[in-house]
Amino acid sequence: MDLQGVGAIAAAVVAAVGIPSALIIGRWQMQGAMRNAEETARAGIAQAEANYRAALDAVKTTAIETHRQWRRGIQRDAYATFLIVAHQTREDCERCELECEEDVSDGEFTALKINVRDHLKQLKEAQTIIELEGPDAVASAAAAMVNELEILVMTYPSQADYSRAWGKLLRATTHSDTRVSSPASDYLSALYRLKQAFTSSDQSHSMTEEQRAQEIREARAECSRIEGSLDDDTLSDDERFALRQGNSPSPPSNSQHCLQAIQAFQQAEERFVRVAKDELHSTNS
């Protein structure tokens, strides 16, 4: 075989070997590119998931903080409303004592007592919100304030009715018309005997329970009999009831029971303000 034939055969052999080699190398390169693409895709997915989780955490944190601020705002409004109405209720009670000694009309005085009851109702409504919103320490302090205010609400208006009625009777005894002055004087005397009956019943150790009750019943019966001779416009129903109960004529502010309630209310209020501040300023709620 001449040199040209040998060269042709060698070229064919090289060509036959080169084609598969090129195919193999190309396949290796393709596999490497695919692996790089897969790794890049996985890295991209991982980054996307991390970004998504971070976004969710940020939204969750913002939502929690927003809810916390919203709830704290509700608590702050409830606490403030409760304190304002509590002070309005107490001020109305004290006004009953002051205005019972002034020449205000029966309608004005009745409106004042209704205002006391309305404010007490509003106070209990505010207390209900505090019980729902909590915490228990604040709700407990609010309940203590309401309990002491209820004592004042029962004491002041009733005592004011008594003082107001007593003043009306004293003025009626000086009326020029004996049809007005005489029944008023008789009623005052009967009330004094009723007061004595209560006092003697409390101080006498020789009387039995039945004797004490009988003396009070007789004194009340006498008051009721004389009361019937009074002009209908002389006293209101509340004033007649207060007089028949034989309440002490001293102003409510001088009553030991009332003073104790005022002191207990002030202590409960101090406690309420303290625990309410702790709750509003806490970073855990």
Image: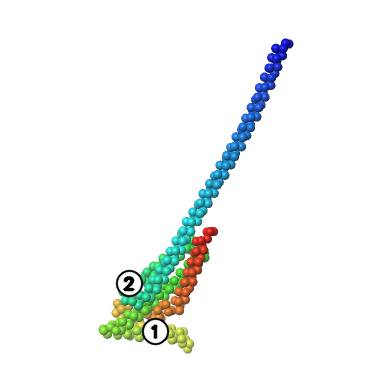
How far from the left and from the top, in percent, is residue 231?
Answer: 29, 79
Which quadrant of the structure image shows residue 151? bottom left
- Can you identify the residue that label 1 sits on? 194
**130 vs 151: above or below:** above
Residue drawn 37% across the image and 79% down it: 163
Q: Quadrant of the N terminus?
A: top right
Identify which amino acid the numbered label 2 is placed on.
Glu
The CA distance from mark 2 to mark 1 is: 29 Å
**199 vs 35: above or below:** below
Which quadrant of the structure image shows residue 251? bottom left
Residue drawn 39% across the image and 81% down it: 249
Coloring basis for residues = rainbow
User: Pointer 2: residues within 10 angstroms few (<14), some, or many (20+)?
Assistant: few
Direction right: furthest residue: 1
- Can you identify the residue that label 2 sits on? 108
Identify which amino acid the numbered label 1 is placed on.
Leu
Question: 218 or 166: which is nearer to us?
Answer: 166
Q: Secondary structure at mark 1?
A: helix
Please give left or right for residue 29 compared with residue 204 in the image. right
How far from the left and from the top, in percent, is residue 227?
Answer: 33, 81
Q: Secondary structure at mark 2?
A: helix
Of tags 2 and 1, the one toward the viewer is: 2
Residue 113's disc is none
Residue drawn 67% across the image and 19% down it: 15
Q: Is residue 260 visible?
A: yes
Direction front: furthest residue: 3
